[in-house]
Image (cartoon, rainbow, N blue to C red):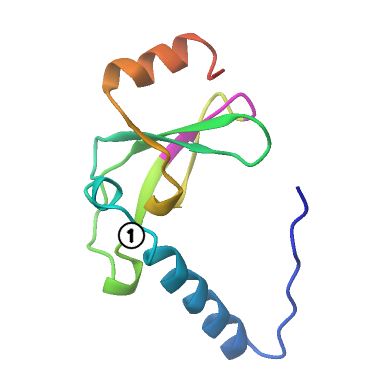
């Protein structure tokens, strides 16, 4: 899977491009994805042949409305078994997980 590298003439142009990508992703959010909140779990595809398992964390501050579909998560996979913190757009979610399903994935070493 190749990734496209984009070049921008200005920071403003980069911001506009990012905003357009966020709006495109927002348009694909399903109701179950929008309902994802702190202490929930979900799975998404890495694009590299393995799943990523996400635990949604508490956030200290409310996000601006244009970032409403991002969640602060600790994400785990075979590539990052100890977890990595970051923001994930909920449109990436393929399936909601129960705590038990998340724990089973952990017991399998984050393998599918």
Q: Which residues are magenta?
A: 74-79
Q: Residue at x 31, y 41 (%)?
A: 57
* 24 sits to left or right of 109: left
Q: Residue at x 66, y 32 (%)?
A: 49
* Badge 1 element: loop
> Could you say which quadrant of the image residue 56 lies in?
top left
The crowding category of the residue bearing disc 1, from other C-alpha atoms within 10 Å (few below 14, some 14 to 19, many at least 20), is: many
Q: Residue at x 37, y 35 (%)?
A: 95
Q: Residue furthest top?
A: 107
Q: Is residue 45 above or below residue 26?
A: above
**Residue 86 picture location, percent across and down:** 47, 48
**Residue 66 picture location, percent across and down:** 33, 73
> Could you say which quadrant of the image residue 4 lies in?
bottom right
**Residue 103 picture location, percent across and down:** 37, 15
The residue lying toward the viewer, choosing from 32 and 98, is 32
Residue 11 painted magenta: no
Residue 77 painted magenta: yes
* 20 sits to left or right of 98: right
The count of marks equals: 1
The residue lying toward the viewer, choosing from 85 and 99, is 99
> Could you say which quadrant of the image residue 50 lies in?
top right
Q: Is residue 85 above or below residue 22?
A: above
Q: Is residue 26 above or below residue 42?
A: below
**Residue 41 picture location, percent across and down:** 32, 33
* 4 sits to left or right of 47: right
Q: Disc 1 designates what residue?
A: 69
Q: Residue at x 54, y 19 (%)?
A: 112
């Amino acid at each position: 899977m190749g990734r496209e590298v984009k070049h921008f003439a200005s920071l403003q142009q980069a911001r506009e491009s990012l905003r357009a990508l966020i709006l495109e992703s927002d348009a694909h959010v399903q109701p179950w994805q929008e309902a994802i909140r702190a202490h929930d779990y979900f799975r998404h595809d890495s694009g590299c042949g393995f799943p990523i398992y996400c635990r949604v964390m508490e956030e200290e501050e409310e996000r601006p409305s244009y970032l409403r579909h991002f969640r602060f998560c600790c994400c785990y996979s075979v590539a990052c078994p100890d977890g990595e913190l970051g923001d994930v757009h909920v449109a990436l979610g393929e399936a909601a997980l129960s705590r038990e399903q998340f724990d089973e994935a952990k017991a399998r070493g984050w393998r599918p």
